[in-house]
Amino acid sequence: SAVISQKPSRDICQRGTSLTIQCQVDSQVTMMFWYRQQPGQSLTLIATANQGSEATYESGFVIDKFPISRPNLTFSTLTVSNMSPEDSSIYLCSVLFSGGGFFGPGTRLTVL
Amino acid sequence: AQSVTQLDSHVSVSEGTPVLLRCNYSSSYSPSLFWYVQHPNKGLQLLLKYTSAATLVKGINGFEAEFKKSETSFHLTKPSAHMSDAAEYFCVVETSGSRLTFGEGTQLTVNP
């Protein structure tokens, strides 16, 4: 298993601004994943972040809107850029081990 | 492409009665399947995982799921519901690149 922490746990932001979310894992992992959970909905994968390479984005998500950094094997950041109210969601990072996928507690973002 | 369909968006049971949450999968090969639970304002918790070792998988908190290839199903069951089981449940399939694809979720209500 893994212990995953995220910062901040929640934030309220103004439209047009950007927020960077941090994800820290207590063990080294090759791949980290970022998901979005819009209000009342299921989780959708945003991108896969490999250390030392560019993140791979899913259909409907672009690097200009959601830039990702992966400086080492235990840490990643997701930035939500030029925010609008439609970006209000819970953002979760995740790692996958043989026992299953493990998720951080999430960052609850509200954009006004 | 692999996908999962949760057949019920909402299930309501009485405390002490059995729980059945239905999930069908679509995959060209034997997939890795998971069930997760999300309590209100809480993180995602892995209930159980199927990886082709045994068709009946036992998870935490008395939940189990049976993989039926002939029916392409992976239903979640529990013999006796507790009030604390009230939550959102997600059926999940692992796709290429170790990515997780979530079903739309089933909201379980447990009535006293």
Image: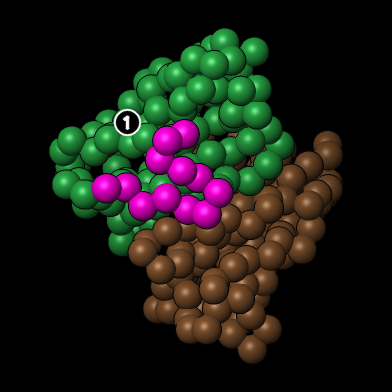
Chain colours: A green, B brown
Q: Residue at x 31, y 61 (%)?
A: A98
- Which quadrant does the C terminus of chain B fall into? top right
Image quadrant of residue B75? Answer: bottom right
Q: Position of residue A44 (x, y in %)?
A: 55, 48
- Which quadrant does the N terminus of chain B fall into? bottom right
Q: Residue at x 42, y 73 (%)?
A: B51
**Quick check: A58 left or right of A87?**
left
Q: Which is nearer the eye, B96 or A67?
A: A67
Label 1 packing within 10 angstroms: few (<14), some (14-19), many (20+): many
- Visible residue check, residue B74: no
Q: Position of residue B106 (x, y in %)?
A: 72, 51
Residue A112 among those drawn in magenta: no
User: Which residue type does callout 1 highlight?
Assistant: Thr
Q: Secondary structure at mark 1?
A: strand
Q: Position of residue A17 (x, y in %)?
A: 49, 15
Characterize the magenta stretch by its predominant secondary structure: loop
State which region is magenta.
A54-65
Q: Residue at x 32, y 47 (%)?
A: A55
